[in-house]
Image (cartoon, rainbow, N blue to C red):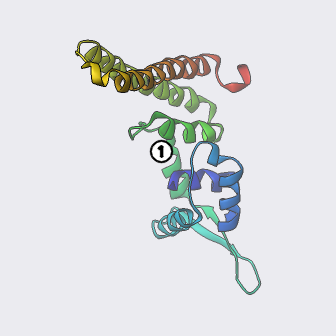
Amino acid sequence: MAHVILGLLLLAPQSLYGLIKNFEAGVALVYSASSGSIKRALDTLLDRGLIEVASVEPGGRGKKVYRTTEAGRQEFHDWMTGELSGTNLEVAALPRLFFLGLLDPEDRTPVLRRMQQRAAADLVDLTALEQHLDAMTVPAEHREIVAYQRATLAYGLASGRHAVTWFGDLADRGGPEHL
């Protein structure tokens, strides 16, 4: 969450309301967040010195506009160019892909290759699970249940193969403008 907010603030200084609207308008397609979680993340980023209040608009409520600090820009860059963590590839990769244009062109392909490698590693794990299941004997009373579990696995395998190819093609072509 914090890194997504840093990315949005690198695009333009924004208020809490602006961040919430930007989540709803674009980032929510790849990363969901509540207004409360955005506010908590803003407070944490402020406490860590990764963002600062750029201005306070006049009026009764004194709406604060936030911007990244140099430390925030470095934190964002380190996250973008670092290893993908977590158990869900889409949650790890898609927010980075969304903000990939903020990186220098020479930094983008290595990030895409890490996404491709992560997809390939996940695919290896799913393939091993498929092989393990192939070796099991399923009792007759569980065959319908297992059939849908195997369908779920088949979806994961197909999705994994697609991700490996898609991220690789994007890296090979040098970005989305060449798709």
Q: For this view, does 101 lie left or right of residue 3?
A: right
Q: Quadrant of the C terminus?
A: top right
Q: Nearer the viewer, residue 165 or 134?
A: 134
Q: Is residue 152 above or below residue 10?
A: above
In the image as oriented, which residue stretches furthest toward the right? 59
Residue 38 x/y as whole percent: 56, 62
Q: Nearer the viewer, residue 16 or 70?
A: 16
The residue at which mark 1 appears reads as: 79
Q: Residue at x 41, y 36 (%)?
A: 83
Is residue 13 something that shows in the picture? Answer: no
Q: Residue at x 56, y 42 (%)?
A: 95
Kind of residue sitting beneath label 1: Trp
Is residue 33 something that shows in the picture? Answer: yes
Q: Specify few, some or many for label 1: CA neighbours under 10 Å numbering under 14, 14-19, or 20 or more.
A: some
Residue 6 x/y as whole percent: 57, 54
Q: Residue at x 59, y 42 (%)?
A: 30
Label 1: state its secondary structure. helix
